[in-house]
Amino acid sequence: MRKELCFIVLFIVLLFDCFAQQKIFPQLGKDSIRNVINAMTLDEKINLLVGIGDISSKSSKERNTVLIPNAAGQTWNCDRYGIPSIVLIDGPAGVRIGWLADQNASPNYKYTSTAFPTGTALAAAWNTDLAEFIGETIGQEVLDFGCDVLLSPGVNIQRDLLCGRNFEYYSEDPFLVGKMGAGMVRGIQSKKVGACVKHFAANNAETNRNTCNSVVSQRALREIYLKPFEMVVKEANPWSIMTSYNRLNGYYTSENPDLIETILRKEWGFKGLVMTDWGAGNDPIAQMRAGNDLIMPGEWEKNVLRSAVKNNILNEEILNRNLVRVLEYIMKCPHFRKSHYSGSTDLRKHAEISKKAARETMVLLKNENNTLPIGKSVRNVALFGKTSYKYIACGIGAGDVNYKKAVNMPEALTVAGYNVNATIASIYQEFVDTIQSKNINDKWIVDKHAEMPVSRKLIESQVDNSDMAIVTLGRITGECFDRSPEDFVLSDIERKLLFDVTEVFHKAGKKVIVVMNMGGMIQMSDWNNLPDAILHSFLSGQESASAVVDILCGIVNPSGKLPMTLPVKYTDSPSSRDCPGVPKDNPIDNYYNDDIYVGYRYYDTFETPVTYEFGYGLSYTTFKYSNLELSKKSLDSNDIVVKATITNTGKVPGKEVVQLYISAPKGVLDRPVHELKGFIKTRELQPGESQSIEFRINKKDLSSFWTSKSAWIVDRGEYIIQIGASSRDIRLSDKIIVGDDIKVETVHDVLYPNKRLETLVLKE
């Protein structure tokens, strides 16, 4: 009896102790965040401010990401406060869910997700509704796989044609980038998961990306490189922002309070969390002070922060401030809400969505004598180029997706009812299989390999068995490396292949089509006269080849337009003089001497010849622009409404991308000849059908940044409103008058360059 009584007493003590524990440790979501923080030890706070890396991360020795295979990282859990880990996952073209590697075999792909069109491809669609819909679908996969935050989108500017990560980014134009990025964020977050906008800021090259200093004028920063981030923050309210690897005007971005606290939080009103890129920065104390709330991932940083607080170098209240934002962030996430997830998703449905999206991203660059769509007389196709047989869905690094299968061109053509020349196909397939067998774990080994040489004799022997030839040209790019100038031009093997195929087939009276499968552009001025038609498919996801064939055979009318300018040669680009930096072989500083003259702003203003201009793209139909109407001819506090009518004047249904540019008067500052300030993609218009479109223009759209006044100012004078099909195909124009200079907004005088720039200026 006494023994039983002792057990009862012990049970009661333990029970009371349990209740006491509940009382001692406040719970996140039930108690105030401040009470939770006040109850934490210093080590617990630091653990929550320094995240955990993936399995391969050298920075995380104590603990690996185990919730989701190959997730980029996660935050620490702290169970006694009811704080779960949240999972951060890449990336821009789809959920980069990973695989569990078998120690004795090749990777065992346990999870697969959907590869959607990459950023540049989506921008080529010029359709913010499409970006939002793709964001919703990717957000659903984030939720289905038990993740909390998608590390996407990347809204950096495609400043230089050779940047390795251009395929992840949208465009050379900040307005187009901002609108597409905002659409993507709205879509992702509609599923109650977070988007993380990256890489903040001026991260426009991969060479020495962890250390190189971007030297940029305050005006170029405000008008070009910060503008997309500002638009996304104000239009889509992202849950988080990721700071970049690079230095900006002398300071690492993750350690710069002027960038994070002054501009992002005070000026733009950002309320969310700021995290580092993986392993970015050099000083965790500076990162905490700067308002970079979460360091991803980390280990040694914890000791530094602990010592700094104990030695009165860092005020613990700084940690508490950042921790508030971390905990607010966690409370939004599915793992905190205890959302159920299945660990699988509707891959078949999402593949169809990816295909439909890819159809809108394709840009028809050439269509001589109506070569496309392919006529009914064509049934047998000779398919050249290794990329035809191993189509590239996405790029290397964070922008990669572990998809189940990417359709190739022979499969897509066969499904569409065409016969692929078996002799040529067998030779290419053997070539591709042989390369892949050398390293089955390298999914890009074929893409990185040189093109297969093809004898003219083989081409001649098969021309009679083929009604048409398709040559696919591919390029693979990715994180951590930039493209070389040599990669921007055709190799000798590619050049000979294209020349021989076109000459042999043209001699036989047959057409040749070139399909470009790459994240960006290559020099075309020396070969685009050879084929009869050229279609750029970018990196448009796992169903890209199927979408290409749908366009080639006329099931779909191409409606994409270029989100970048293609110069005649790389050295025509103003950034080519400074990229990747100084010194060229191991850059320390990257001088942005092109200043505000990025992309078409340079080529159109300085009247430089180009191969294809910004916004260019052909259709199988034609469109008439008419009835331009402005709601008023002077600027006041209300928006100016611009209306126009677009009519399909051709014989087949089609969509048109209508672009609005504004040309400013010559004032105190040099200005580009015009700047994109609006775009609309029409619905699919039937032959003879019209659609009225409407743009709205406000004061900020007309303003430029005056460094001397740290203000956005509208110059007095005459502004030309231009409506066009590209930056060099203006169809309608009218003007408005501004009587006096107008100060729109005054901002902080921060982020001035730490070194002298020799920026481009207009000559009188």
Image (tube, rainbow, N blue to C red):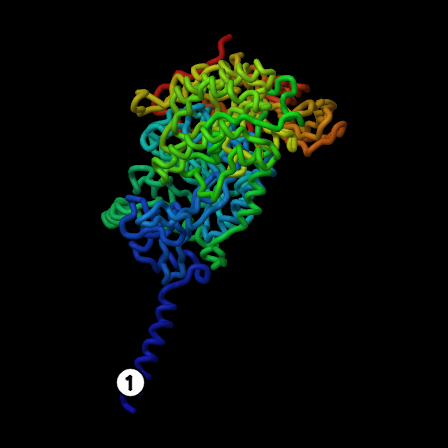
Compared to 694, does 47 lie above or below?
A: below
Give the residue type at disc 1.
Answer: Cys
| Residue 556 relative to residue 670: left or right | right
Q: Which residue is mark 1?
A: 6
Give me the residue at 59% from left, 27% from top: 380
Q: Which of 684/123 is in front?
A: 684
Residue 314 position by quadrant? top left
Residue 637 position by quadrant? top right
Residue 667, image x, y percentages? 55, 16
- What secondary structure is found at the residue carrying circle 1? helix
Residue 8, image x, y percentages? 33, 84
Give me the residue at 33% from left, 45% from top: 297
| Residue 452 relative to residue 674: left or right | left
| Residue 233 relative to residue 478: left or right | right
Quadrant of the snapshot with the N terminus: bottom left
Number of residue marks: 1
Residue 231, image x, y percentages? 53, 35
Give me the residue at 49% from left, 49% from top: 142
Q: Which of 708/192 is in front?
A: 192
Residue 442, image x, y percentages? 37, 37
Residue at the extreme right: 688
Q: Which of 235/498 is in front?
A: 498
Q: Which of 62/427 is in front?
A: 427
Q: Is residue 711 visible?
A: no
Residue at the extreme top: 764
| Residue 717 relative to residue 192: left or right | right
Q: Is residue 209 visible?
A: yes
Question: Badge 1: how crowded within 10 Å, few (<14), some, or many (20+)?
Answer: few
Give me the residue at 53% from left, 14% from top: 503
Residue 725 position by quadrant? top right
